[in-house]
Image (cartoon, rainbow, N blue to C red):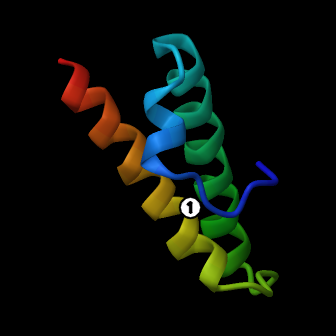
Amino acid sequence: MSENNISAENLRGLSEDELQKYLDDYRQELFNLRFQHHTGQLENFRRIQLVKRNIARILTVQNERN
């Protein structure tokens, strides 16, 4: 994912399928960032926090809809 931050307003305008795709992409990115961190290859530690925050936003929007 190239976007640093996604607002909740933008997420609310997406369909369920689009939200799920974003969620899957961010979870894969988080896995890769954690792997890089543990192997000592991660340069931008702040990115982990941003990705986790974006995952939380997506989950919040999904829960609002349910």
Q: Is residue 16 above or below residue 56?
A: above
Question: Could you tell whether 12 is left or right of 6 in the image?
Answer: left
| Above or below 32: residue 15 | above
Picture quadrant where residue 50 is located: bottom right
> 49 or 66, which is in the foreground?
66
Residue 11 at x, y = what percent?
50, 36
Q: Is residue 62 left or right of residue 55?
A: left
Residue name at image x 59 percent, y 20 percent: 18
Q: Identify residue for label 1.
A: 51
Q: Position of residue 41 (x, y in %)?
A: 82, 82
Q: Residue at x 74, y 84 (%)?
A: 44
Q: Is 8 left, or right, of 40 in this rendering? A: left
- Location of the C terminus (image quadrant): top left
Q: Can residue 22 be seen by looking at this rendering?
A: yes
Q: Is residue 4 left or right of residue 23?
A: right
* Residue 32 place in picture, x, y as percent: 70, 57
In which quadrant of the rendered view does residue 42 lie? bottom right
Quadrant of residue 25 within the rendered picture: top right
- Nearer the observer, 61 or 33: 61
Q: Amino acid at mark 1?
A: Val
Observer-nearest of 52 and 64: 64
